[in-house]
Image (cartoon, rainbow, N blue to C red):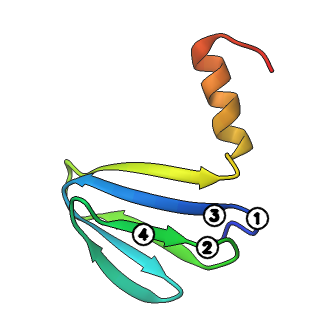
Amino acid sequence: HIHEHIEQMMLILSGELDAILDGKLFRMKPGDIIRFPAGHEHGAQMVDVDCSIVDIFSPARPDYEEKLRNVLGTTK
């Protein structure tokens, strides 16, 4: 998939995953970080069931902001 105006970074905390950026495959392990620039095709698939990651979006995705407000019980 592609985020036209949002950059994404993934930090691998545990386990392994396969990340794809512009058709190139990267095997990611704990401590690895990958950056998906806005407008570039990318994706990821966990190799381990217990894989943990931190996803960072810039700017923040509006749907994530809404989900966070719902969890916290706050408004805009």
Label 3 – label 4 distance at C-alpha: 11 Å
Q: Where is residue 60 in the image (x, y as percent from the top left)?
A: 67, 46
Label 4 – label 2 distance at C-alpha: 10 Å
Q: What element carries label 3?
A: strand
Mark 3 neighbour density, 10 Å: few (under 14) some (14–19) many (20 or more): some
The answer to whether mark 2 and mark 1 are in CB contact below 8 A is: no
Label 1 – label 4 distance at C-alpha: 17 Å
Q: Which label belongs to residue 5?
A: 1
Considering depth in this image, is 61 or 44 the residue closer to the camera?
61
Q: Is mark 1 on a helix, strand or loop?
A: loop
**Amino acid under label 1?**
His
Q: Which of marks 1 and 4 is nearer the N terminus?
A: 1
Q: Which quadrant of the figure contains the N terminus?
A: bottom right
The residue at 69%/40% (across/down) is 63
Q: Where is residue 15 in the image (x, y as percent from the top left)?
A: 18, 56
Mark 2 neighbour density, 10 Å: few (under 14) some (14–19) many (20 or more): some
- Decide if residue 49 is on the left or right side of residue 2: left
Instruction: Classify 21 as above or below 35.
Output: below
Q: Earlier in the sequence, mark 2 or mark 1?
A: 1
**Amino acid under label 3?**
Glu
**Amino acid under label 4?**
Ile
The answer to whether mark 4 and mark 2 are in CB contact below 8 A is: no
Q: Name the residue under label 4.
A: 34
Q: Earlier in the sequence, mark 3 or mark 4?
A: 3
Q: Mark 3 points at which residue?
A: 7
The answer to whether mark 2 and mark 3 are in CB contact below 8 A is: yes
The residue at 33%/80% (across/down) is 26
Q: What element carries label 2?
A: loop
The answer to whether mark 1 and mark 4 are in CB contact below 8 A is: no
Q: Mark 2 points at which residue?
A: 37
